[in-house]
Image: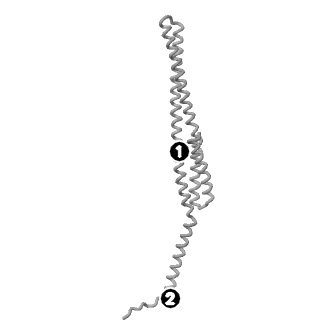
């Protein structure tokens, strides 16, 4: 006895062929869509790079801000100490006017010591103010860099949602401006 397959129904063969054609067309359409939208990978990578740059800018900006506050506080304390020394000097000067002998010599020595300490404190306070001012110079460019980078990230995200390449270009340009200000804020100031 031989097993002979029964001939398939011609209508079923057409359905199977149509299903295969449909699957092939769907697969080809998916490949074409992936090829057309492969640029979105680069947009995603750009977003990650811009987010890292934004984090660095925020971290550095916070560090410079802390330096500004610390130096300002130290300068204020130094100026207060300077004022206290000035008051002591004035009191010692008043003592020298009415004092005689050993008291006058001691009061004159105190006046001279206070003058020397005042000069040191004044130089120290001005140095702290200069350090404060130097740290404060970094703030505006870093602030602009952070804003530019954040807007660039938002534009690139909208670009991914809408699949509009011009938004990618705008995000890239704005991101480049942000990176330039980041570099200027860190090293150019």
Label 1 to label 2: alpha-carbon separation: 70 Å
Query: Coloured how?
Result: one colour
Q: For mark 2, does the 10 Å Cα neighbourhood hold few (<14), some (14 to 19), or many (20 or more) residues?
A: few
Residue 35, image x and y in percent? 56, 67
Report the number of numbered marks.
2
Furthest residue toward front: 187
Q: Residue at x 54, y 48 (%)?
A: 54
| Residue 143 percent across, percent down from the top left | 58, 43
Q: Residue furthest bottom?
A: 1
Locate residue 62, reporting x and y percent.
Answer: 52, 41
User: Which residue is located at x 57 percent, y 53 percent?
Assistant: 154
- Residue placed under numbered mark 2 in the picture: 10
Q: Position of residue 103 (x, y in %)?
A: 48, 7
Whether pointer 1 and pointer 2 mark residues with C-beta atoms closer than 8 Å, the reply is no
Question: Crowdedness of circle 1 by 10 Å Cα count: few (<14), some, many (20+)?
Answer: some
- Residue 58 badge: 1
Q: Secondary structure at mark 1?
A: helix
> In the image, is residue 72 above or below residue 81?
below
* Mark with earlier residue (1, 2): 2
Q: Residue furthest left?
A: 1
Q: Who's the residue at 57% across and 64% down the image?
A: 37
What mark, if any, has residue 122 been given in the picture? none
What quarter of the picture does the N terminus occupy?
bottom left
Secondary structure found at label 2 = helix
The answer to whether residue 6 is above or below residue 106 is: below
Q: Is residue 54 above or below residue 83?
A: below
The quarter of the rendered structure image containing the C terminus is: top right
Mark 1 vs mark 2, foreground winner is 1
Q: Write the residue at 51% across / 39% down.
A: 63
């Amino acid at each position: 006895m031989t097993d002979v397959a029964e001939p398939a129904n011609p209508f079923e063969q057409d359905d199977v062929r149509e299903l295969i054609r449909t699957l092939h067309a769907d697969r080809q359409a998916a490949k074409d869509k992936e090829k057309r939208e492969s640029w979105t990978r680069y947009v995603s990578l750009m977003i990650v790079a811009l987010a890292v740059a934004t984090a660095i800018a925020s971290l550095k900006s916070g560090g410079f801000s802390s330096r500004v506050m610390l130096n300002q506080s130290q300068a204020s304390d130094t100026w207060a100490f300077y004022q206290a020394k000035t008051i002591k000097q004035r009191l010692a000067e008043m003592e020298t006017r009415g004092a005689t002998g050993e008291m006058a010599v001691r009061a004159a020595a105190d006046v001279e010591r206070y003058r020397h300490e005042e000069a040191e404190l004044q130089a120290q306070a001005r140095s702290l103010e200069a350090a404060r001012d130097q740290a404060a110079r970094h703030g505006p460019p870093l602030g602009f860099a952070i804003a530019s980078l954040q807007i660039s990230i938002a534009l690139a995200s909208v670009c991914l949602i809408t699949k509009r390449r011009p938004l990618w270009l705008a995000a890239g340009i704005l991101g480049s401006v942000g990176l330039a200000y980041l570099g200027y804020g860190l090293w150019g100031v």
